[in-house]
Amino acid sequence: MGGPASLSRGSRVLLLAAVAALVVTTAPSVCAESHQIKKLVETPVRSSLLAQLSVAFPSVNASCQCSRQTQQVVRAALAGRLWALRWVDASARPPSGLLSGNVNQLGDYDECLGLDAGDAVAPEVSSALPRPSGHQTSYCLASVALDVPDDADSALGELSALLHSYTPFRSNFSDPGHRVPRFSAAYLGVCVPASCTPSEVQAGLEAVLNSVAGASEDGVSVRASVTPEMCRAKDQSPPAEGFGAWLARTTLWWTVAAVVLATFIDVVSLDGEGPENLLRYTNCLSMRQNWRRLVSTSDEQLAKGEVAVLHGVRGVNALGLLVAHKSVALLYEPYVNRTPAVAILGMSWSIVGRVAILYTDCFILLSGVLAAKAILRQLDRTGTVPLLRRLVDRYVRLTPLLAALIVLCTLVLPGLGGGPMWGMVVEPHAALCRRHWWRNVLYIHNYYGFEDMCLTHTHQLGIDMQLFLAAPLLVYPLWRWPRAGAALLSALAAWSTGLRYGVVLEHKLSTIVYFGMPVSQMFKTASLSYILPTHRLTVYIMGVALGYALHRVPASFRLSSTSASLGWAFFATLGLLPVFGPHHAGTPTYNYDALEAAQYAAFAPILWSAFVCWGVFAIARGSGGWLRDLMCWRGWAVFTRVAFALYLTQFPVFFYNVGSTRQAGFYTIRTLLNIGEFTVIFIISIILSLTFEMPFQELWKIFNKTTEGDTNKENRHIAPPPSDFNYRLACIS
């Protein structure tokens, strides 16, 4: 018995000896490895933004929990802990190329929000400093502004100009940033403990950056802004939804389901056979049937010159606005070569995009043309205008797509993604629409200011609806008393011109987006002039006059070659003046002049609209040569059928891509003409048009035919409503 017991004791002794030897030989290796890691990461960690914030937080009276957790993360990072190193790594750091405009450093949004207490990370080097279970991360995108006094020396001024990329827009933290970027600020992504409030992060950043920048008595200082909207935690809950949101979401998806079901029935089940009523409504909702209507170019109206050219004018201007709006969205994006890119955009030729208000004037003019033609036909037939019928007709044709877009941008789009700038360009629009959607569906949103508008790009619909309501009051005097009516319209046009001149001069506004324009001035111009129908009335009246001329002048009328040549030369000169005349406003050396801005706001729309009116009339009456062939191309008819949806869709797509941006890119001309992005916009526009716009238009036609059939039994004098073409084309883009 003694033998086995003795052997057991001997075995234990040998085991202890082996363990001791293993510890002796392994411990130095582990310690050496740990020491190497600490030595490797010490300098980067100590110079990191988070480490400097950990020092600054106590000095700015941040909460004990925020300061303590930040310091714990930094100590763990210095000890080589992987979870802490990832935390430090997620924040922005100074890059190369600052003088080329590479000042927007977004950090690593996904790495920051991917850090949570439940993460399975790689085996740690040491059991010391384990990750505290209560540490949750928050990603904040801070706005940072470097203030340099006006009397600074030339070298400092040039340095500031390069860092700010020559400031194509001047802004303050208080300026709205959801529609136009605050270009004067740089953006820094910071990954901090969720216990740190935005105000604490802001105070800490200001302390750190002023210390690094050496803010001193020479007046140079750094300001920071961190708002709750620009901070995001991983498990952040979406805003609470009430019954109205539930009802809107349900209606949206039921509409989609009805369209899908009707398409399925149309394609698979019935194949043209079945109950008449079911087929009729299925044909209204079916995407296949609406696709055929969308791409059809067999309409007899397309052969008429005046109709075809209106399609062309609208199509060309819609494409011009698409590129102009894309250029605005680009200014949100971080670029490593932002300063050289802005230098290119600061050349004289950029004025073509800076006078984009002229392109929207074209849509208002077209609306006046179509309204006048429809009303004049009605007056010639019956001598009266059915005001209520026109209003309801118009409302039903415009509202379904607008309402669908509001629901999508408010309740659906915010949940489809995320990113550093998501809280800057996507969520603010959703928040505004939650509060003010009703203004849009009543078409009065343009009277409540640009900064508080749900989907700011829809302001044109409000203007158009209000001018549409006023159209009978403008057209009837012209039809009943041509001379007196013309005098009345001239007086109203002069009054509108005077309004623009006076308001721009008094409030120092500008309808040209000149180089260095303050964002506040841009919003003020929109609210006090650009989105008001009284200020756009001049162009609408010119459209009414053109509609009257097209209605009264026989289609067989032809201009002589001499008259046509002189007319094109004269009116082309008028049209080029407002486009290229203020070319100096696109350069960094431009100095704003209120009198010059007032004169431009008053007379530029008249000159441009005169050129468009001449072009439409001349082409409609057989003049124009190759330009006539281009503007009367049948393909424009297909394009303009989705132009309304295209206009509504482009900004949500632009802002989705801006909000999803994770890192700085390199700007080229292909960045502006992004064919892939434009293709996505066209595809979404077609889908929305086939799902919401065209089905409701077809259903409304059925309703009109039914009510007309019942009414005509009693009154045969009721004229049919204006053609669907008139209403579709008059939907302002």
Image (cartoon, rainbow, N blue to C red):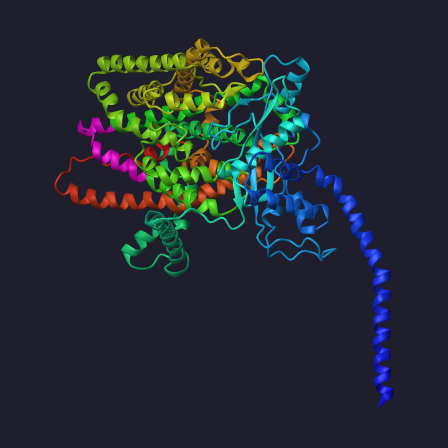
Foreground pick, 155 / 102:
155
The magenta segment is: 377-397
Give the percent coordinates (x, y) of residue 366: 37, 26
Q: Residue furthest front?
A: 2
Figure check: 52 above or below 576:
below
Q: What residue sits 72% from the left and 56% below the top?
A: 124
Location of residue 270 (image quadrant): bottom left
Position above or below: 207 against 714: above
Q: Residue furthest bottom?
A: 1
Say if residue 6 shows up in the picture.
yes
| Residue 446 picture location, percent across and down | 35, 29
Q: Is residue 10 left or right of residue 195?
A: right
The majority secondary structure of the magenta stretch comes to helix
Quadrant placement of the N terminus = bottom right
Is residue 698 left or right of 639 when viewed as pictured?
left
Q: In the picture provided, is 96 more to the left or to the right than 560?
A: right
Quarter that holds the C terminus: top left
Q: Is residue 635 magenta?
A: no
Q: Is residue 341 left or right of residue 28?
A: left
379 drawn magenta: yes
Q: Residue at left 44%, top 9%?
A: 595
- Percent position of residue 720, x then y: 23, 36
Q: Is residue 595 above or below residue 614?
A: above
- Name the outermost residue toward the top: 595
For residue 187, say whether it is visible: no
Q: How many marks?
A: 0
Identify the image quadrant of residue 346: top right
